[in-house]
Amino acid sequence: MHPTIFVIFGVTGDLAGRKLLPALVTLYSKKLWPQKFAVIGFSRKSFNREEFREFIRERMKIRPGQFKEEEVKHFLDHLSYEQGLFDDALSYDRLKAKFKEIDDRWGQCSNKLFHLSVPPALYQGILKHISSSGMSVPCADDTGWTRVLIEKPFGDDLMAAKSLDKLLGKLFEEEQIFRIDHYLAKESLQNILAFRFANTMFEPLWRREHIDQVHIKLFERGGPEGRGTFYDSMGALKDVGQNHILQMLALVAMETPRSLGSDDIRRERGRVLTALRSIPGQALEKQVVRGQYIGYTNEKGVSLHSQTETYFRIKSYVDLPRWKGVPFYLESGKGLSETKTEIDIYFKNKSDENHRNILTFRIQPDGGIKIRFYVKTPGYSFKTEPKSFRFSYAESRLDHNIPNDYERLIHDAFSGDQTLFASTEEIMACWKFVMPILERWGSLPLKKYEKGTREV
């Protein structure tokens, strides 16, 4: 594999310590990184080499026995640090000089993978400096690529998303841009496609003639958990609705792609999201609910007078022939009775609505698939009762083989596979569906609910 340099802007932040660096160690331990690689942390804090290594070791919170000690030590040997300011051009010149130093030592030009582990407000400045310093240009001899990983939220409204996308289009080629929605990398979510397209018995039923409704749920028991200031500026709909939940909808509703290549899969996801029916003003109160759990305004970082929603429920429709008239219920919230993410598909039963078959994709926790069906109750009368077929990764002892979302994302970015990354079309379609709701958000009553309940 070609030598690679992985740069983390904002390496001292929470995301890098909690997600990125553990994923990198895991990939290294699985021998999924090239023999020649370097990880460069970029931030404004002052560290010498040893201080930085100790800081990283502590932040990764490696569990006893999780890795061999020599693996961790060898991984840390590949780490270095560049102190700099995100808005200082000279800092990027020093980073570029470090690239040359490493490439000269290796005797060849390396791949460069940049990850922006920073607040979205810093994206445009960092991207411009990467470009103006010449670091966005791949090796002149085509032996090494340059790619950039962008975290969600991709803009905080449609206009900001268009502005960021326009800038990316000027500075990078589309094949260099990897827009992260980490939900797309969850193994149990990818299983939706495998279940649909590998089991031909279900595909004829996957349409409006047989499906009554689809319910997508992302529930959390906790609150903002230390993200109060950020969350209060976003709210539930921007935080998870505009991205995670709509991407789940796209996977359920997409047509069979021409191939399993990234372009074909992303094209079909984008087609679904573009077909989401806008909710007119007169239908807003009938189709949308917003709520806030009692006590939210006492959370750290949250305004005492906050009107930010911690819960939403949307009744939506996809204007494609396959789904004409089928409601997709999109629901998410914090402070609810349980933490789970799942998709319920209700099949029609014209003779008895109380005896509908339900197919459930459980994304987390305990990823798996469940089908509710009915059997005859033993006895002389013809009564039926519900039973379940169930597949669970944990019960099948397959869960230890599942890469976590950031392991998969980094691996695929290194491989150049954009399947699990959002396209421009998908992101713009999501914002176009959400923006009319957000623009009239304040006209909806903010329903209060007790923390730890589902009664909203």
Image (tube, rainbow, N blue to C red):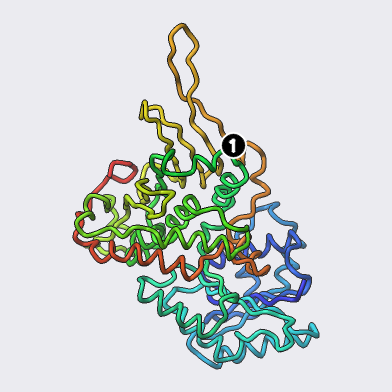
Q: Quadrant of residue 228?
A: bottom left
Residue 371 pos. (x, y %) = 51, 34
The residue that appears at 52% across and 41% down in the rendered structure is 204
The residue that appears at 23% across and 63% down in the rendered structure is 440
Q: Quadrant of residue 174?
A: bottom right
Residue 32 pos. (x, y %) = 73, 63
- Secondary structure beneath dot 1 equals strand
Residue 269 pos. (x, y %) = 49, 59
- Circle 1 residue: 391
The residue that appears at 75% across and 76% down in the rendered structure is 3
Q: Is residue 224 visible?
A: yes
The residue lying toward the viewer, choosing from 412 and 358, is 358
Q: Check the image and name the residue furthest to the top.
A: 380
Image vertical order of residue 85 relative to residue 330, above or below: below
Image vertical order of residue 303 relative to residue 334, above or below: below
Which amino acid type corresponds to the residue marked 1 in the rendered image? Phe
Q: Categorize mark 1 by other alpha carbons within 10 Å: few (<14), some (14-19), many (20+).
A: some
Residue 169 pos. (x, y %) = 50, 81
The residue that appears at 74% across and 81% down in the rendered structure is 143
The residue lying toward the viewer, choosing from 402 and 435, is 435
Along the horizontal axis of the image, is 284 left or right of 43?
left
